[in-house]
């Protein structure tokens, strides 16, 4: 092989290797990466303000503040890297409340969700068809849009269709492995909320104000009135 051909072959090989490297998926952020990103003043610790920065919603913020206090073992008002890593990964990223999800989906800000807005981001033909069926079943007036209360009814139907484990995780907004009354009733419409609260109190026999997974299964064993 002459010199020009050899150079072309080497360049082609290098280009091929470069394309393979570029195709490699980026590494997932570690707890250390997340800590550094939150530590905006680079002092090696997180204040409550730094930890809760960017968290929207009164309930989500309150849950984050509670996690901060639990993780702050020495009660110095800051989280070290080790204390931060003690927070469960699922809890580190608070889930959105029904109100926050509704607002995020309502892209035109008209206070209701069209079928397109409601199904946005849902992948898979079967899941999309199920979502469309829920939308039409709840939109009884055929208005073409769901208000917040109707959206909560749709979420409750979605939770009911899921397995108990999936439903529990979805409702457990702060990721602490138990459900508060607010979390348990968050997706219920006003009409069904009173009955849901009664079931919660009936199952919470030790009056702790929260339900374990087993208690949650007992609560959902009774059909909620429509």
Image (spheres, rainbow, N blue to C red):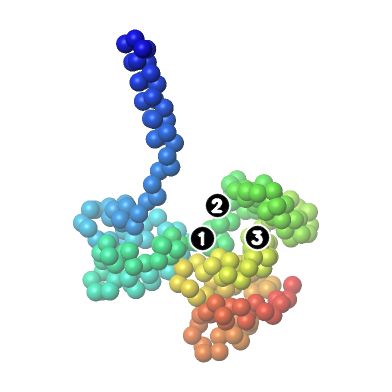
First in sequence: mark 1 or mark 2? 1
Residue 68: x and y in percent read 34, 68
Q: Is residue 93 above or below residue 72?
A: above
What residue appears at the point 48 percent right and 73 percent down from the top-left corner?
177
Which residue, as the protein is rendered here, is positioned at the far left? 43
In the rendered view, tell whether residue 23 sits above or below residue 35: above
Residue 198 on image: x %, y %: 63, 83
Front one among 14 and 120 = 14
Residue hosting label 3: 151
Q: Is residue 47 left or right of residue 151?
A: left
The answer to which of 104 and 82 lies nearer the viewer is 82
- Mark 2, secondary structure of its residue: helix
**Residue carrying label 2:** 104
Front-lying residue, 24 or 90: 24
Q: Residue at x 67, y 79 (%)?
A: 221
Callout 1 secondary element: loop
Q: Is residue 192 left or right of residue 186?
A: right
Q: Name the residue nearer the viewer: 27 or 207.
A: 27
Task: Give the residue pinned by disc 1.
Answer: 96
Residue 101 at what x, y percent from top left? Answer: 56, 57
Is residue 69 shown above or below 135? Answer: below
Please name the residue shown 23% across and 71% down the image.
76
Whether residue 61 appears in this view of the structure is no
Quick one: label 2 or label 3, which is nearer the N terminus? 2
Image quadrant in which the C terminus is located: bottom right
State if disc 2 and disc 1 touch (CB < 8 Å). Answer: yes
Residue 38's image quarter? bottom left
Q: How far, Cα to Cα, is label 1 from label 3?
A: 14 Å
Crowding at dot 2, Cα within 10 Å, few <14 / some 14-19 / many 20+, comes out as few
Look at the image and tell me in which quarter the N terminus lies: top left
């Amino acid at each position: 092989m002459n010199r020009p051909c050899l150079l072309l072959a080497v360049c082609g090989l290098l280009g091929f290797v470069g394309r393979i490297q570029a195709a490699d998926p980026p590494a997932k952020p570690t707890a250390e990466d997340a800590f550094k990103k939150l530590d905006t003043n680079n002092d090696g610790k997180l204040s409550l303000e730094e930890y809760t920065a960017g968290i929207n919603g009164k309930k989500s913020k309150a849950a984050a503040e509670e996690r901060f206090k639990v993780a702050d073992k020495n009660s110095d008002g800051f989280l070290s890297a080790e204390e931060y890593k003690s927070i469960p990964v699922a809890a580190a990223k608070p889930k959105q409340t029904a109100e926050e999800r509704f607002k995020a989906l309502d892209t035109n800000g008209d206070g209701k969700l069209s079928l397109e807005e409601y199904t946005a981001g849902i992948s898979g033909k079967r899941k999309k068809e199920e979502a469309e069926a829920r939308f039409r079943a709840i939109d009884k007036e055929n208005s073409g849009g769901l208000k917040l209360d109707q959206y909560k009814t749709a979420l409750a139907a979605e939770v009911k269709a899921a397995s108990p484990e999936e439903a529990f995780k979805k409702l457990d907004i702060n990721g602490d492995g138990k459900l508060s009354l607010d979390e348990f009733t968050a997706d219920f419409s006003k009409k069904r909320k009173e009955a849901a609260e009664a079931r919660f109190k009936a199952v919470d026999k030790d009056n702790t104000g929260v339900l374990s997974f087993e208690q949650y299964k007992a609560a959902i064993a009774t059909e909620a009135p429509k």
